[in-house]
C-alpha cells in the first residue's frame, strides 16, 4: 500500500506469441511448393524442437495437410518428422524447409522466431525417389553395348550430383554394374 502522495514505478511487459506452420504434401512435379491438385498427407505426426533438440510439442497434420504450432515464445526452433516409407523429401524452397537426415527423418533448418512472428513455410513435400543404374565398362569391340566378357573399369569413381552440386560417389569394383 502506498501512502497518499507516494508513487511507485512498475515496469510491465507484453509478449506477443508467434507460430510455425507448414503443409505436408506429395510434390507431383518437384516444384518445391504445394500446388492445387497435389495430394495432402493427413494425420502425419510432426514434432517441434528447441535449438537444444528438446521436444517442445507435437501435432498431426489436418485434412488440409497443415500443422500449426501456436503460442510460441521468441527463440530458435526446428520441426522434425519421420520420412514416409518409400518417399523422400522434395527440394527446399517455396513452401519447404524440410531436409532429409541420414537417420531417415526430416528436419527443417533452425528457425529464429522473433516476437510475434508467424512462419508459414515450414512444410515438407514428399516424392517417390528415383534411382540411377547402369554399366560402366571397357567396350572392347567398340559396339556401344555391354557384351559378356567385357571388363569393368575397376577403380573408376562415378559421381551422382544433386541440384546443389553435392555429390555421392561410388568406386567401380569388378562388376561393371552400378
Image (cartoon, rainbow, N blue to C red):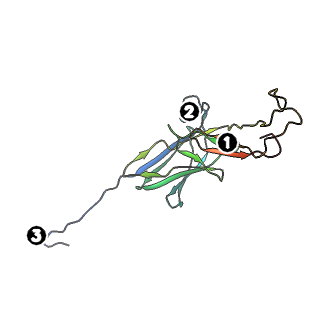
Residue in front for this viewpoint, 141 or 16: 141
Whole-number angstrom distance, CA of label 2 to CA of label 1: 24 Å
Whole-number angstrom distance, CA of label 2 to CA of label 3: 68 Å
Q: Position of residue 64 (x, y in %)?
A: 55, 37
Q: Quadrant of the N terminus?
A: bottom left
Residue 87 falls in image quadrant: top right
Question: Which mark is drawn over residue 159?
Answer: 1
- The image shows residue 41, relative to residue 144, as above or below, that is below
Residue that lies at the very extreme toward the top in this rendered image: 143
Q: Residue drawn at (83%, 45%), measured in percent from left and top?
A: 174
Q: Residue drawn at (42%, 46%), measured in percent from left and top?
A: 118
Q: Earlier in the sequence, mark 2 or mark 3?
A: 3
Residue in front for this viewpoint, 175 or 133: 175
Question: Mark 2 near mark 1, Cβ–Cβ under 8 Å?
Answer: no
Mark 3 residue crowding within 10 angstroms, few (<14) / some (14–19) / many (20+): few
Kindly identify which residue carries mark 3.
5
- The image shows residue 49, relative to residue 30, as above or below, that is below
Whole-number angstrom distance, CA of label 1 to CA of label 3: 81 Å
* Helix, strand or loop under label 1: strand
- The image shows residue 48, relative to residue 90, as above or below, that is below
Residue that lies at the very extreme toward the left in this rendered image: 5
Of discs 2 and 3, which sits in the foreground?
A: 2
Amino acid at each position: 500500500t502506498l501512502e497518499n502522495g507516494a508513487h511507485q514505478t512498475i515496469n510491465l511487459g507484453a509478449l506477443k506469441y508467434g507460430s510455425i506452420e507448414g503443409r505436408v504434401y506429395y510434390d507431383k512435379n518437384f516444384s518445391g511448393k504445394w500446388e492445387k491438385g497435389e495430394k495432402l498427407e493427413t494425420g502425419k505426426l510432426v514434432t517441434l524442437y528447441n535449438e537444444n533438440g528438446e521436444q517442445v510439442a507435437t501435432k498431426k497434420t489436418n485434412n488440409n495437410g497443415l500443422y500449426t504450432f501456436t503460442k510460441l515464445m521468441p527463440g530458435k526452433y526446428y520441426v522434425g518428422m519421420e520420412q514416409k516409407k518409400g518417399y523422400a523429401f522434395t527440394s527446399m524452397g517455396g513452401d519447404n524447409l524440410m531436409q532429409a537426415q541420414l537417420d531417415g527423418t526430416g528436419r527443417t533448418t533452425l528457425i529464429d522466431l522473433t516476437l510475434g512472428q508467424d512462419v508459414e513455410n515450414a512444410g515438407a513435400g514428399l516424392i517417390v525417389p528415383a534411382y540411377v543404374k547402369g554399366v560402366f565398362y571397357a567396350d572392347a569391340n567398340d559396339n556401344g553395348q555391354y557384351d559378356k566378357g567385357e571388363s569393368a573399369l575397376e577403380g573408376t569413381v562415378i559421381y551422382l550430383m544433386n541440384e546443389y552440386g553435392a555429390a555421392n560417389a561410388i568406386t567401380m569394383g569388378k562388376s561393371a554394374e552400378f
